[in-house]
Image (cartoon, grey):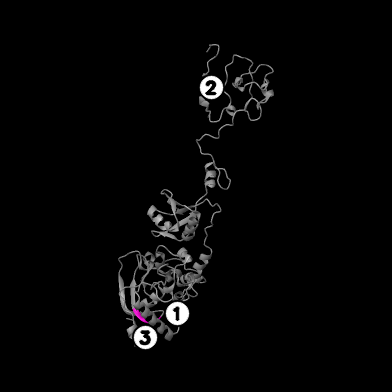
Amino acid sequence: MATSLGSNTYNRQNWEDSDFPILCQTCLGENPYIRMSKEKYGKECKICARPFTVFRWCPGVRMRFKKTEVCQTCSKMKNVCQTCLLDLEFGLPIQVRDTGLSVKDEVPRSDVNKEYYTQNMEREIANSDGTRPVGLLGKVPGHSDMLLKLARTSPYYKRNRPHICSFWVKGECKRGEECPYRHEKPTDPDDPLADQNIKDRYYGINDPVADKLLKRATTMPRLDIPDDKSITTLYIGGLGEDVTDSELRNHFYQFGEIRTITIVQRQQCAFIQFATRPSAETAAEKSFNKLIINGRRLNVKWGRSQAARGKEKEGQTESGIMLEPVPGLPGALPPPPLSDEDAPANYFNLGPSSSPAVMNFQGLPPPPGVAMPPPPGFGPPMYHTMDPMAPPMPPPMAMRPPGQVHYPSQDPQRMGAHASRHGGP
């Protein structure tokens, strides 16, 4: 029991005696089976200066021992943890929460007014069920989008680490690995986060952690609405393995009729298509950066339009950059063959009525005076034979009809596969 309890000895009926503290999940620790030491009327509350029951425990291995700092009455008035003084619902400082909810709860600072205010709050807590906030905080109608975006969804056990060893900073610590304190470089003393006051944190003024979070809220990204009105699909990322189709439907059905829900388990994402564009816009606005399912914060974005997906199928991205061809697949189909009217007459030297099927592309020496230079893009020189008994030769790749893919192994003229028309070897 504390030796000095200040000026509260005359009002002992208001001293607090409790069986279990009011703690957040982070301060309680990850081990559900912990031991606590209980000291009845162990210390004075750092806010109201009234004696209360102090609890002390170790939240985990290689963690520092923690204890309650304020009484349960002050904790219930602000709906905060008795140890870290962070909001029990959002895990945020009181200044951030009051700013997001537009609450200005001014607790008296003087001793007389503070005592009177605390007794009225105790009476209000006794009349309620004890699980809901009281005072101005209990009269707030709803939540704030900023708080849902900044809220911590999982416990932050790093906050329970031991303090920095002052002997190690001076170079005099001889415990080594057995030292229960951290051997790390301390923070800069000029850093505002290094100077935190428990009363300022409780009253919601001059809190450096709250200032840092409020600045982060002003720079958070926003979800822009696409100009294409045909887009009614939302992309949901970061599903993990626990989120199911029914859980997504239970959350998004409130915004409008859902046409389809497609879950891609390999990518851990889902695509939700709404029947109307207003429903999709409402769902994106209400869910962006604040959608939490099974303790996981999900990423919400707009889906892509059909035109953008069509460009990617053709090998071109939205930015206009051509994608590299896939190895092993045939290239583009050859252009259609030239017609008789389009073929140049001076090339064949036979007039526009000649057919290119009688051209010899074997590279044989031509008769005198028949060699003609090839047109641009037609490859090696081609020659015309005057023998009317010559069999028709296959057209080159540039003259073959579309849809026919040529491979060198399919050419019957290679490796002596074509028999001589004279019957010889």
Element marked by disc 2:
helix
Q: Answer above or below: position of 210 versus 44.
A: above
The residue type indicated by label 2 comes to Arg
Pointer 2 residue: 414
Residue 61: image quadrant is bottom left
Q: Main secondary structure of the magenta part?
A: loop
Regarding residue 44, the answer to whether it shows in the image is no
Which mark is in front, 1 or 2? 1
The residue type indicated by label 1 comes to Val
The residue type indicated by label 3 comes to Asn
- Residue 276 percent location from the top left of the image: 49, 53
* Residue located 46% across and 56% down the image: 299
Pointer 3 residue: 8
* Residue located 63% across and 30% down the image: 377
Q: Find the distance from the CA under tag 1 to the CA under tag 2.
A: 98 Å
Element marked by disc 1:
loop
The N terminus: image quadrant: bottom left
Q: Answer above or below: position of 350 versus 83.
A: above
Which mark is in front, 3 or 1? 1
Q: Answer above or below: position of 400 versus 93.
A: above
* Residue located 53% across and 63% down the image: 219
103 horizontally vs 69: left or right: right
